[in-house]
Amino acid sequence: MTNNKLKEKILIKNGRVIDPANKIDAVLDILIENGKIIKVGKSISLQPSAFSLIDASNKLVTPGFIDIHVHLREPGYEYKETIKTGTEAAAAGGFTAIACMPNTKPVNDNQSVTDFILDKAKKEGVVNVYPVGAITKGLKGEELSEIGELKSAGIVAISDDGKPVMNSELMRRAMEYAAMFDLPVISHCEDLHLSEGGVMNEGFISTELGLKGIPNAAEVVMVARDIALAEITGARLHIAHVSASGSIMLIRDAKFRGVKVTCETAPHYFTLTDKDVNGYNTNAKMNPPLRSEGDFLAVREALREGTIDVIATDHAPHESSEKEVEFDRAPFGIAGLETALPLTLKYVNEGAMPLNDAIAKFTVNPARILGLNKGTLSEGADADITIIDIEKEWQIDVTKFRSKGKNSPFHGWKVKGKAEMVIVGGYPAPHLRR
Amino acid sequence: MINKLKSKDLLGTKDLSPEEIVLILDTAESMKEISSRDIKKVPALRGKTIINLFYEPSTRTRTSFEIAGKRLSADVVNISVSTSSVAKGETLKDTAKNLEAMNPNAVVIRHPSSGAPHFIAKILKCPVINAGDGAHEHPTQALLDIFTIREKLVTSRTKKLKGLKVSIIGDISHSRVARSNIYAMNKMGMEVTVAGPATMMPADIRKMKVRVFTDLSKAIEGADVIMMLRIQLERQEKGLFPSIREYSRLFGLNLEKLKNAKGDVMIMHPGPINRGVEISADAADGPYSLILDQVTNGVAVRMAVLHLLTGGV
């Protein structure tokens, strides 16, 4: 990630600096040295030869975005995505750090897979990569992974994402065990009996299309279970990709009672509804599915009022041919890294969520959940920074994605706001414009 | 009056206008006359190739389309799943592209996945006719059902389709026949009631503008037409009903239960029948049963659809 042409010191001038952790929203300069933030202040001046200058006039300067929920596919599914292409997509989307889920082949349920990911990320990655370890060996939901060893290898959380741990007793033990290492447990909440065979949200649209539905209850009953387990274990529970209004009510109530629960949603849940599946659009097929209008509104409200802590992409790239099949045979998931920012800004511009709150959900909030010294522009913090042109109008074009995954329902959308540059560990990530 | 269909394809009755439905029914009337001749063949589609692409077992519908094509002098080719390259793992996209390369004039498709006909219709330049996709639609079945009802109304010289009360009984969730009939009948101004176990009633079905019951006798009260659906016996294993015995007791139609219905009620079934399960033998074979008329009319309606979509003028 080093760039010899750049000097050790970088001065970012005249940007609108938003740092939610420090309640900063002002036009300021930021001085970076040796990968750390040295100073944030008004009109910092230095000897001209001593630094590289980045003019951020009329731009937004924020802590580097952190995506807590990404599928990098490597090892095992390199035809869908690699650590290289996935991190390039992250940088293009404004992210400087991503947490990658363990459902690779082999599964990241042991130290050697974690080592491989971290090693590959160091060599080929352009942003920080934080592996998430499997809760159970092989994601089978039968026996706990060696979570202690995974922790020392460098995982930041555990999850069987893509699959729930259906055995409630095992999930309880996983939470107790993870709490020893202060690791958050990221739960993909889905009752597999209720969702069996389902390919979209259960409702009028699934009835019209003749597709098997997945009821909200498939998510809600597991959210209820996991909150109850978090309560008796004291573990830190993070609920992935919340889509159903019932889940939000339970999480809001649990937070009120002081249960250590946080949650995320993804831009598609506050941008689309199950109506977007009409025409058997396989790019609108994801798990959990796009929900009804009522859920869509509940997710938006929960973002606004703060029940939803984090915006994550659930970036799930697939090869095009895998999605060009009958709807019920297509895999779940969308490529989300390169569209999350403008879709979130769209919601901000619609006037419902303050910009600073949106930035917090991409920065300080995921950093706190994962225990990272990131997500802020505090002096001494890692110099991970995202510079955004908030006024830039552009059209989403999957053929220009850095990700190998072109599976996006947003292809062709006209949007506003784009990451201009990301600085990772004090250096601008390789310029990614085509 | 219109004389052709808007779309290149027939994917569902949801997309048809009432005028288009009437056009198909009127065309089917003249087609039915051909089937009553000694020499049951006209040269209307001579030199045209129709491919029947069947990914699910089917006797009635496939044969009906085949006879319909042949009576119009088209060359009809049947591809069924066991003999095609599907078994070797070819994708539907590739199959469609390969068929396209052979320049067919129409492709008739039945597929277990809802939306499969829509998928290939985007690839094929020729008309695609949906012969049943998953639990979605089976438009020619609905059209032949309405044709059959309309024909009976003419002979009994009573009323028009508008306002006619139809009750569809059985597994509505998994039924493409129910969906196509609900759309088409609503467009014709008919009043549709559905009934079946609550476990087989799809979400928000009321939004499809139907009355919903879980009690058979209430559902058939005052009905002009009762349409019984086939119950798939494997649904029992999925926990959707406890036993054939109980299903039959609650939702099976027999002469005893028919006492609650109108004296001249028409009884229909898309087939194949589970005798003694959803319908008793005496009800299926009784004087008000239109089940075999449906089969006869299926050929005429499919001739009409093939002619309208591929016949040029």
Image: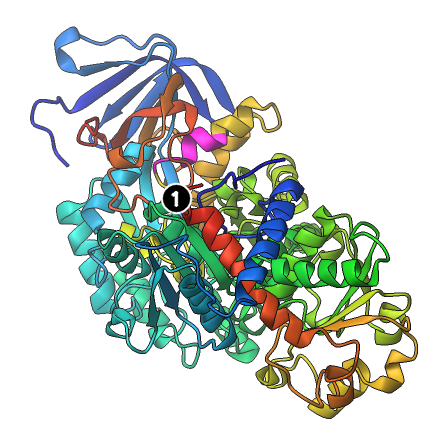
Q: Quick check: A156 above or below B66?
A: above
Secondary structure of the magenta portion, mostly?
Answer: helix
- From the viewer's perspective, tell me whether residue B279 is left or right of residue A31: right
Q: Which residues are magenta?
A: A338-344
Q: At 21% across and 32% down in the image, what residue appears?
A: A429
| Residue positioned 33% across, 45% down in the render | B125
Left or right, A309 with reference to B266: left
Instruction: Say above or below: A92 vs A32.
Output: below
Taking depth in this image into account, of A412 and B62 the one nearest to the observer is B62
Element class at badge 1: strand
Q: Quadrant of residue B204?
A: bottom right
Residue under the point 62% across and 34% down: A304
Return the residue nearer the eye: B86 or A271.
B86
- Image quadrant in which the C terminus of chain B is located: top left
- Is residue A342 one of those drawn in magenta? yes
Q: Give the percent coordinates (x, y) of residue B241.
A: 70, 82
In the rendered structure, the answer to whether residue A99 lies left or right of residue A47 reads right
- Among the 4 quarters of the image, the one containing residue A190: bottom right
Mark 1 surroundings: few (<14), some (14-19) or many (≥20) residues within 10 A: many
Which amino acid does the dot numbered 1 rest on?
Asp
Image coordinates for residue B154, horizontal then vertical, percent: 77, 58
Q: Chain of mark 1?
A: A
Which percent across, then down, holds residue A420? 30, 23
Q: Is residue A42 magenta?
A: no
Q: Position of residue B263 (x, y in %)?
A: 91, 73
Q: Which residue is at a point 51% across and 75% down the rendered structure image? A: B60
Residue A278 visible (yes or no): yes
**Quadrant that contains the N terminus of chain B:** top right
Q: How many marks?
A: 1
Q: Which residue is mark 1?
A: A67
The foreground one among B300 and A108 is B300
Name the quadrant containing residue B87. Answer: bottom left
